[in-house]
Image (tube, rainbow, N blue to C red):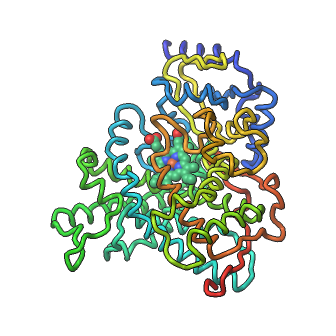
Amino acid sequence: WRHAARWLRMFWMARTIPGPSNGVLYFAGPLGEVVDKSRVAQQRYGNTVRVWAWPAVNVTVCEPEDLEVVFNSPYLQHKPAIVYGSMSPILGEGLVTLSGDTHRRHRKAIGPSLHLEILQEFVPAFERNALKLCEQLGWLASTGEEFNAVSLLGSYSAHAICETVFSAEAPPILGESKDHFVKYLLEASRLMLSRVMKPWLSWDAVFFFSSQHAEYTRAAQAFEAFVSKMLAYKVDQLRQGDAYTAHGGGRRRKAFLDHVLTSPEGQVLAPRELTEELKTISGAAVGTSTDFMSFFLLVNALLPDVQDRIFKELEDVFGGSERPVEPHDLPHLQYLDCAIKETMRMFPPVFTFSRTVLQDVELPSGHVLPEGCIVAGLPYFTHRDPRHFPDPETFDPSRFLPENSRGRHPYAYIPFSAGSRNCIGQRYAMMSAKILSSSILRRFQVLPSSDGPRTLRDIKLVAGISMSPAGGCNVRVVSRRPRSA
Ligand code: HEM
């Protein structure tokens, strides 16, 4: 009865927060309408909205002042199973879904292996895969065809993850199963997101009878099999002592997994825990990076002035040559960096993230989050607050120049979330995005498709936990230099 009393108390207290009386049914319907419905709800009820989501209560918060509390309160760091549970079969029991001491222990073990110096070793792998994508773009440019770039971008992200997370040296075992890994990782990411976006499928009993169940289980098993095989191979190599010495005695390039296995911090993870983290890192990286790049290419296609300015900066840095990008080039790509950040402001690939409220928490806006409810952030709306981003519907990369960012509330811009549960792959994501986008824009002009959106406002959005452009990323490319074609 104590449980029932707590539950009734939560509903009783939450009634004072404004929100639609029909609760989650307000959002029922196509995922393409979620953003518009959320916007109407925000206009009608304000920046804090309560949604009855039987048996839970969901409270969305958008103001940076409230988010500061959400990101830092010790009572708001647990992930709700009702939201994240259905990701576990694919994503594993890793950082995204874990909470409490186990989460802290895993984060300490993994964090050092994503250090900036380590990421810089990944630059050639990002570039190699970016150039493979450019080869395909060269062919598409020569045909003049319009195409949906999503599968090319997804394949880039999955191949880059394979080489940077599992093995930089393409051992025979990887060669055999890499294509399977990429295929299953892409399939697993797609199925996971489509399940998460249909809340009724979060109940295993309902999901079991759904048409997706067999496909989902197969992708999850294949993904798990690859990760376990790679881990066993690496551990074996390490035991034999020849893992990091290339033929001829030089040092082999290490991937993230090599670093975790050999760092004192990483060794606290048991093999099972490491397998789960490898699934989490791969799964968390691919969909988000693909969605981001889809938005970025669309923005460039629709805003030729922005694209021209990025191209000019690339010409200044690379002098019109085909030379590979080096880590020391990246700090010189300031306008590109600002354009990437502005794309993430207007189109954050993670639409929402949630926490369970472990104890009543009062927010600066005056609302009290009752114990037991779920609190969710919506970066899309936080990023459109005119107090922090004047004229928020205008794409303006200069907002992110250091002189224009000074004094902005630290939680007004949160595409990677913030606090102890922020994105651990943030620097990886930015580096990969910079290398891929610079590789493409150095060689190609990106143009809009004939029947696609004409302005940024025309881009229709599909939103659940993630956000992507409806219909994908339809564009056309023209070679900048005959050599690229
Ligand atoms: C543009 C690309 C990306 C975006 C926008 C993004 C965004 C986010 C956000 C908003 C969160 C918090 C989610 C939540 O609280 O539910 C998150 C968590 C996470 N992300 Fe990313 N992410 C990106 C790329 C990556 C990459 C490339 C990796 C791995 C290399 C990665 C690994 C993770 C992990 C492991 C977590 C869970 C962290 C924790 O709770 O301790 N992400 N990401």
Placement of 60 over or under 194, stated as above or below: above
Count of numbered labels shown in the rendering: 0
Placement of 378 over or under 261, stated as above or below: above
What quarter of the picture does the C terminus occupy? bottom right
Which residue appears at 66% of the width and 20% of the height? 365
Q: Classify residue 483 as left or right of residue 459.
A: left
Placement of 59 over or under 131, stated as above or below: above
Along the line of sight, the residue nearer the viewer: 255 or 392: 392
Which residue appears at 63% of the width and 78% of the height? 137
Q: Quadrant of residue 282?
A: bottom left
Which residue appears at 63% of the width and 48% of the height? 401
Along the line of sight, the residue nearer the viewer: 197 or 46: 46
Which residue appears at 58% of the width and 16% of the height? 362
Q: Classify residue 408 as left or right of residue 75.
A: right
Q: Is residue 156 visible?
A: yes
Residue 393 in the image, given as x and y percentages of width and height: 78, 46
Placement of 253 over or under 335, stated as above or below: below
Residue 229 in the image, given as x and y percentages of width and height: 32, 64
Residue 299 in the image, given as x and y percentages of width and height: 72, 59
